[in-house]
Amino acid sequence: MIEPTWLTAARGKLAVRETPGPASNPTIMSWAKRVGAKVLGIAFNGDDVPWCGLFAAVCVTEAGLKPPPIAIRAKSWATWGDPLDPKRLAPGAILVFERPGGGHVGFYVGEDDTAYRVIGGNQSDAVTYTRIAKDRCVARRWPAGLPVIGAPVRLSVAGVPLSRNEA
């Protein structure tokens, strides 16, 4: 199956996780340095800062795309690219969610009747797949000017819990 290059970049980062305690994971810190404070909108000083927007930014940057202004903020992604109808989702679509204390951004990999399966950063302090309720999704986006590759992917959810808070 052909998938968008930014989704391939995201999959290549699976299992990267925060360093417990006062130290920060050098890989996550290198992503911040590569993307830069101008794009992120802040000087990223540690992996204890929510970094789902950083993860999305580094993946789209590696694919040759420009992230939104203040890319560290998950909700900045809600106006990035072009809107995508829920019936037209395809692997790699950018999904933005509401959560207590802010937002969350990740990439669509599939869905069931009630939730999206998302690969994202800062999900349980790591790059993981997680299941997030569809009713929390506030935006579905695709890079402007690029054709949507693929179609919605139906997944089985047997035994897969629903995420409640991605911070």
Image (cartoon, rainbow, N blue to C red):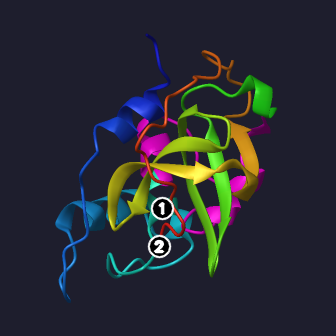
The number of numbered discs placed on residues in the rendered structure image is 2
Q: Is residue 110 magenta?
A: no
Residue found 51% across the figure and 78% down from its top: 42
Q: Residue placed farthest to the bottom in the image?
A: 22
Residue 41 location, quadrant? bottom right
Mark 1 — residue? 52
Q: Which mark is residue 42?
A: none
In the rendered structure, the answer to whether residue 163 lies left or right of residue 82 reads left
Looking at marks 2 and 1 on the same chain, the residue that comes earlier in the sequence is marked by: 1
Give the Cα separation between the discs numbered 2 and 1. 9 Å
> Magenta region: which residues?
56-84
Kindly identify which residue carries mark 2.
167
Q: Is residue 99 visible?
A: yes
Q: Nearer the viewer, mark 2 or mark 1?
A: 2
Q: Nearer the viewer, residue 81 or 87?
A: 87
**For residue 139, side relative to residue 156 (left or right):** right
Identify the amino acid type marked 2. Answer: Ala
**x and y percentages locating residue 152 in the rendered image:** 64, 22
| Residue at left offset 69%, top offset 28% | 89
Location of residue 147 in the rendering, given as x and y in whole percent from the top left corner: 69, 18
**Local crowd size for mark 2, using a 10 Å CA cut-off: few (<14), some (14–19), many (≥20):** many
Label 2–label 1 contact, CB within 8 A? no
Q: With 59 as the anchor, is 47 left or right in this view?
A: left
